[in-house]
Amino acid sequence: MTFDVQLATDNYINALGAEVLTKAAAYTSGSHWTLLWGFLISAAVTWLFVKIQVLEKIEDKLRNRSLWLRSVTVSGAYLLLSSVLVLPWTLYSDWWREVAYGKTSQPLTDFVTQGSISLVISSVLGGLFFSGVYFLMRRLGKNWWAWSGGLTAVSITALMLVGPIWIEPLFNNYTPLPQGQVREALEVLAKQANIQPDRIFVYDGSRQSNRFTANVSGLGSSARIAISDVALKSASLDEVKAVTGHEIGHYVSGHIWNLIGTAMVLSMIFFYLTNAMFNKVAICMGLSANIEDPKGIPVLLLCISFLSLLAQPITNYVTRVGEIEADQYSYKAVNLPDAMASALVKTAEYRDPRPHPWQELVFYTHPSVEKRVKAAMEWKASHPN
C-alpha cells in the first residue's frame, strides 16, 4: 500500500483537536498584533522623552566630560528608563499573555527579577554599542552607517562567544546531562558535529517556559548542547534526538554566520535610511538635535524599530530557510521523521500550524508546523527504512 503523505500530515495536525487549533490561532494572531502595538508604544515613549527633555538634562550635567562618557551614559539611561516606563506593557505581552495561554508557570516575582537582570545587562551593553556608533558618526561623517554595520557584526559575534559562559548562567542553572540513554544518544550527535561530549547540558528551562526546546549555542570551543528539562519530562527519547539533531543542524550548517551577515547588511541599510530620515522624524517629534547628538537616541531607535518592522518578511525568510536546512540535517543524522513530526506538533500550541500564506510570509520565523510535518512525512516516504 502506498504511503499517503498528505493523509499522514493531516492525521498529525488534526490529532490536536479543534479546541487546541483554535487557541493556537488566537495566540499566534495576538502575538502578531503585539508587534504593532509595541511599535506604537515605543513611538509614544519617544515623544514623551523629547517633551520632558530628561536626556538633555543628563547630557547637560556631563557637558564637560568626554563624548564617549556622554554617549554611554545617555544611551544607557534611555534604554533603562524607557524600559521601566513600558513595564506595564512588558508584563502584559511577555508574562500575562503567556500565563493566560498556559505557556509559562513562572511566578511574577521571578519574571520581574530576571527581567531586571536582563535590563541592566542590555542597558550597559546597549550603551557601549551606541557609544561606538556615535564615535563613528563624529569620526567618519557621512560614511558612519557603513562602519556601524561592521560594529554590529563584531558585537553579535562577541555575544555569541561570551553568552553561554557569562550571560546565560545568570538566568538558568546549567548542569551536565546525567548518564543514561539520552546522554548516550546525544554524545553520538555531538561527535558528528565536533562538539565535545563534556559540553552537553540540561537546564531548568521550565523556570521561564513550558515549551519543549533544546539549543546549541556558542562558537568554537564555547559551543554547547543544552536541553531544557521540559524536553526531558515531556518528550520521548526519539523526540529528543530528532529535535537536538535539528539544533545541531543549525550549528553544523553555520547558520549563525548567515544570521550575523544578514544582521550586518540590514543594519547598514537601517543606519543609512535612518541617517536620511532622522531630521524629519526629529522635527515631527519636536526634537532639536542632530543625529550625532546622543540625546537624539530616542528618535534614532524609533527609526530603526520602524525599519526593522518593515524588514520582518526578509529576516523571517532567512530564518525559515535555515529551519528547513536544520530539519533536513536531523533527518539525515537520526532518520526519525515520525519523532520530528510528533515533536513539531507539540509546538503547534504556540504557533498556528495552519496559517494563511501571507501570515506565514510576513510573521513566521519558522515554516508552518503543517509544512514541516509534511516535509517529515515526505522524508519518511522516500526513506522507508
Image: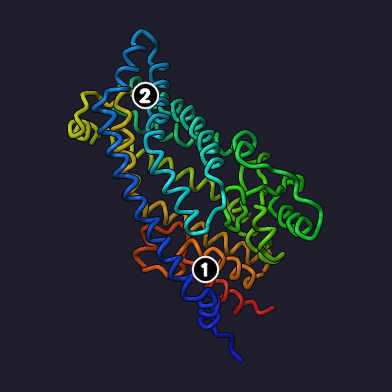
Note whether 37 is above or below 168 in the view shown: below
Q: Compare residues 117 and 357 and report the one nearer the observer.
A: 117
| Residue under the image location 31 percent in, 17 percent down | 57
Note whether 200 is above or below 238 in the view shown: above
The amino acid beneath tag 1 is Arg
Q: Compare residues 243 and 380 and report the one nearer the observer.
A: 243
Q: Which mark is on residue 134?
A: 2
**Residue 311 image point, x, y percent:** 34, 49
| Helix, strand or loop under label 1 | helix
User: Based on the displayed image, in which of its 4 quarters is residue 298 positioned?
Assistant: top left
Left or right? Give the position of 163 relative to 62.
right
Q: Residue furthest bottom?
A: 1
Note whether 141 is above or below 360 in the view shown: above
| Helix, strand or loop under label 2 | helix
Q: Residues within 10 Å of mark 2 (few under 14, many from 20)?
A: many
**Residue 287 image point, x, y percent:** 22, 27
User: Based on the displayed image, in which of its 4 quarters is residue 25 positioned?
Assistant: bottom left
Q: Compare residues 15 and 213 and report the one nearer the observer.
A: 15
Q: Compare residues 120 and 381 and report the one nearer the observer.
A: 120
Residue corresponding to mark 1: 372
| Residue under the image location 59 percent in, 89 percent down | 2
Q: Which mark is on residue 61?
A: none
Left or right? Give the position of 306 relative to 80.
left
**Residue 132 image point, x, y percent:** 42, 25
| Residue under the image location 65 percent in, 66 percent down | 332
